[in-house]
Amino acid sequence: MYPWVADLKDLFLPRTCQICGRTLLREEKTLCLHCIAQLPRLPHWKEENPADERLFGRFRYEHGASFCFYRSGNDFARLIQAAKYKGRLWVNYDLGCLAALELQTQGWPYDIDLIVPVPIHWRRLMTRGYNQVIPVGKALSEVWNIPMDTHLLRKSEYTDSQVRHTFEERLGHVNRTFKIKHPEKLEGHHVLLIDDVLTSGATLSACADILSTIPRLRLSFLTLGMTK
């Protein structure tokens, strides 16, 4: 799009920050620079990474991180919920771009060669119309120049919301619900498993459990948010 076209569009349909509501500048996208600076980032270094600490010992992985702290009612949580429940998928895409660029300064994406989003069951896909994790993967794929595959991992059993369950209960509910299509395509790859929010870790653990059956597969994980 030509700059003058974007300026004309903003004149009649001004874009606003999804947190504070301020009119965005041309170079700003979903959030203004002030709100980007105020995002509740989590440390990503190996020695103080909360996501790494939460999932350590749950399954074997090489690198793991979550971008921001997700707490019900905070601005970041509202962004994630807008993408998941209101279809504002560009929010997750732009957050994914931010995460990718910032993680690059800390060594990511290492030698990861394939991005795999956590899938949702076809019934939920039919109801919702989209998997909100895929825009995150698209952003990471474009910034890091790493391919994404949305078809290799699928959810074969429908599970209800797991919000009120413990980790053990969640793991029991989601275990054996994921299947791999064409596992031979993953042999010898370093796979980045991605999701929107890390809560108990049961979903990532269940995905990792089935992926661990593939010979010579190496695994890392990344989520946009992480609950306290």
Image (spheres, rainbow, N blue to C red):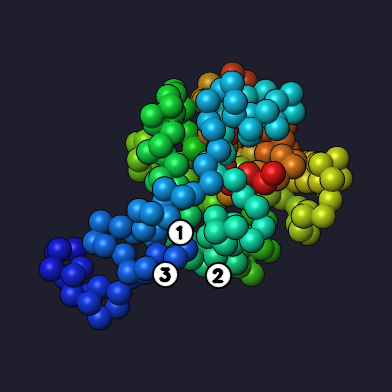
Q: Nearer the viewer, residue 52 or 118?
A: 52
| Depicted 140 relative to depicted 45: above or below | below
Q: Amino acid at mark 2?
A: Lys
Determine the residue located farthest toward the bottom in the rendered image: 12
Closest to the camera, between mark 1 and mark 3, is 3
Q: Tell me where residue 98 appears, x and y as whole percent.
A: 41, 45
C-alpha separation, residue under disc 1 versus residue under disc 3: 14 Å
Q: What quarter of the picture does the N terminus occupy?
A: bottom left
Q: Quadrant of the C terminus?
A: top right
**Residue of label 2:** 86
- Position of 133 with respect to 29 (left or right) is right
First in residue order: circle 1 vs circle 3: 3
Position of residue 32 in the picture relative to residue 19 (left or right): left
What residue is shown with label 3?
A: 21
Give residue 226's quadrant in the image: top right
- Residue 91 circle label: 1
> Which residue sits at x=54%, y=55%?
76
Report the number of numbered marks: 3
Q: Position of residue 14 (x, y in %)?
A: 30, 74
Q: Nearer the viewer, residue 68 or 132?
A: 68
Viewer-proximal residue among 215 and 59: 59
Measured in 3D between alpha carbons, the distance from the residue under mark 3 to the one under mark 2, in whole angstroms, is 17 Å
What residue appears at the point 67 percent right and 58 percent down from the top-left corner? 72
Element under disc 2: helix
- Residue type, numbered disc 1: Val
Corner quadrant of residue 193: top right
Q: Report the amino acid beneath label 3.
A: Gly
